[in-house]
Amino acid sequence: MFSWELGIMRKFVGLALAILLGVLIWETQYPNLVASQEFFSQGHLGQAHAPMPGQIGSMHQGDRPIPSPMVAQAPRQEVQATPVQYGSIDGKSITGYIARPAQATATLPGLIVIHEWWGLNDNIRKMTERLAGEGYLALAVDLYGGEVAETPEKAKELVTAAQQNPEVLKNNLRQAYQYLEREEKAPKIASIGWCFGGTWSLNTALLFPRQLDAAVIYYGGGIETSPEKLQDLEMPILGIFGELDQNPSVETVRQFEAALKGLGKPVEIKIYPNANHAFANPSGTRYNPEAAADAWTKTVAFLAKHLTINQN
């Protein structure tokens, strides 16, 4: 073999090794980005851009779903609560948790309550009861097929599986809406959710752009900011976010707000100073009791304004 041929071969082998080394370093330094690109390329998205499992995991590092005094607060009035089957998927019943004022005698406005990445746990049940105590028929959905996480590792596993099947989640939420509308005869229906549930509260609005009467979004990651995709929304929206949050960032929240206001949509956005992602989650390390209490007050006022509350 000629010397010039050997030289070309050495350069080719060297280039190939350099490319391989670069790829290995990239995957090591940016595992979440690589994973998210694969996730997007496979089309595993709901209607709003769902946050990646790696991103959610980093935001909940060290968290545990342990109830706090805020969640343990008694509802404003006595409520009745029980598990309920509100639909089925692939022949398997979907069991949620429904609560209503104990003294209610007439139909009530309904709330679709969407859990965090932990699943339908005791925290969400208590919050569902508190919402019912404000005069609503509150239905907490189960998007995890009955499973609940007690560690971030298990929660990441559950949220990953859920996000890989967005059509199943949409079907679940459609049946929750239909249950409140058809079985409970709810005159008005709103959605509310936190984190993973905040994203899917917006997705519920996108599923029912003209039917849903209000939507509350607590720091939902990956919120949609495209005016073209938000233009059909007709319900008022309340968005609750933290200044220190990176998913969604303040910039993304402002884009979301600007898109809705540019379309003439009714939207209220509150960004709390010195509050991070999941600041209203009493089981997390970023729980901010002052911001959480104020957000609750704003949520109750918003729902009272846009949902007709029956007096019993």
Image (cartoon, helix red, strand yellow):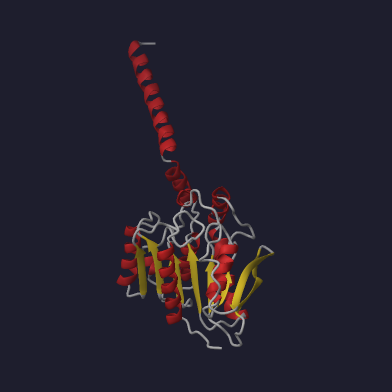
Q: Where is residue 45 in the image (x, y as percent from the top left)?
A: 48, 57
Look at the picture and state if 30 lies above or below 137.
Answer: above
Q: Residue at x 53, y 84 (%)?
A: 187
**Closer-to-camera residue (102/51):** 102
Q: In which quarter of the image is residue 51?
A: bottom left
Quarter of the image with the N terminus is: top left
Q: Which residue is drawn at 52% across and 58% down?
A: 283
Q: Position of residue 171 (x, y in %)?
A: 57, 66
21 with respect to 158 (left or right): left
Q: Where is residue 248 in the image (x, y as percent from the top left)?
A: 39, 57
Q: Which residue is drawn at 46% across and 57% down?
A: 50
**Closer-to-camera residue (297/214):** 297
Q: Position of residue 269 (x, y in %)?
A: 36, 69
Quarter of the image with the C terminus is: bottom right
Look at the picture and state if 112 lies above or below 51.
Answer: below
Residue 171 visible in image: no
Q: Which residue is drawn at 69% across and 64% down?
A: 91
Residue 175 visible in image: yes
